[in-house]
Amino acid sequence: MPNDPNEEARSVDVSGEEALIAEFWAPLAAGADGAFGLQDDCATFSVPAGEEVVVTTDALIAGVHFFPHDDAADIGWKALAVNVSDLVAKGADPLAYVMNVALPRFDRSWLEGFTSGLRSAQEAFGCRLIGGDTDRTPGPLTVSITAFGAVPAGRMVRRVGAKRGDYVYVTGSIGDAALGLALRRDPSLGPRAGLDDDVVRYLAGRFSRPRPPVAIAPGLLATASAAMDVSDGLVKDFDRLCRASGVAGRMEAGLVPLSVPAQAALAAGCATIEGLLTGGEDYEVLATVAPDAAAGFEMRARSAGVCVTRIGVVTEGSAGAAVIGATGEALSFTKTGWDHFFQV
């Protein structure tokens, strides 16, 4: 319940669920014929002949995945982006999504911002809202999205499939989102690391508005033996991929791509390599590629405008991954990544 008994009266200016859907959600379904203007209980969508549906779901919860008072547009963007990230890593073309929202209260300005962020994400990722549910909750605010994509039948790129000798690649840069979160928690970190205001805003944006590399999906379909998105930390997700494939993996810490701000924070002692490699929220793609397909993968990535970096190799041995330091030693970390149930 609101602390101020008048707060709800001020914030409730949308009369009922149907009115809310018509004003805020229905415009997001424009152009999706099977959404029927969100006026039915179900929706339909089709995929091109010879393709099949890929489905994924993720939820964002206030106080767990974002700060309760974060910008509403950022929350809308991120809610869709984290789902699209999974689709991209499977080589899928995003098609549509359904969304369940549980709101502590109706707030027009918040809904306008949230809808704006979703609309921007839709335009960036090429998909449309086709249905969902809106509920009232005593809290916290929760947004759950189920997203659908399409791949040629039988061609979805799975975690399973990495083979001994495959090269290990990652898109973009790693650790910026973890730094952005650290800066939110401790604003003094920026000055101590010598980061100016523009850089601080950039890092904050990597946490609040992740941009999964949608353009890499065709390259993954053509060349990757296995892939997954990097959401819970590069070390943890690399280990997951190796274990799913029943192989061992070797990642060179010194080869992991770090942005200039991340390198500066590391040099200033305001970040650690462990924190950057295990912090999560990167929403990049981790992929394994056979050596004879590596040149083609790199060429396709360049043509798509996506930066890819070779960071390791799949090896013989027990299933699992090792991170190797500058002098060839295996690094030991106190944690490998984020865990929703055991995080402290």
Image (cartoon, rainbow, N blue to C red):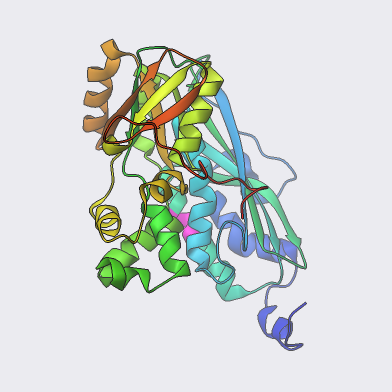
- The foreground one among 343 and 334 is 334
Q: Is residue 147 magenta?
A: no
Looking at the rendered structure, the number of numbered marks drawn on it comes to 0
Q: Residue at x 55, y 40 (%)?
A: 96
Which percent across, then down, holds residue 215? 34, 35
Res 195 quadrant in image: bottom left
Which percent across, then down, holds residue 204? 39, 62
Q: Is residue 132 left or right of residue 263?
A: right
Q: Is residue 175 in view?
A: yes
Magenta segment boundaries in residue numbering: 116-120
Q: Residue at x 37, y 39 (%)?
A: 213
Quadrant showing the N terminus: bottom right
Quadrant showing the C terminus: bottom right
Q: Residue at x 67, y 65 (%)?
A: 20
Q: Is residue 91 in view?
A: no
Which percent across, then down, holds residue 284? 40, 40
- The foreground one among 141 and 229 is 229
Q: Residue at x 76, y 64 (%)?
A: 136
Which percent across, then down, holds residue 15? 73, 72
Is 312 rendered above or below residue 6?
Answer: above
Is 286 rendered above or below residue 70?
Answer: above
Q: Is residue 18 left or right of residue 232?
A: right
- The foreground one among 174 and 225 is 174
Res 225 quadrant in image: top left
- The foreground one among 251 and 225 is 251
Main secondary structure type of the part rendered in magenta:
helix
Q: Is residue 118 magenta?
A: yes
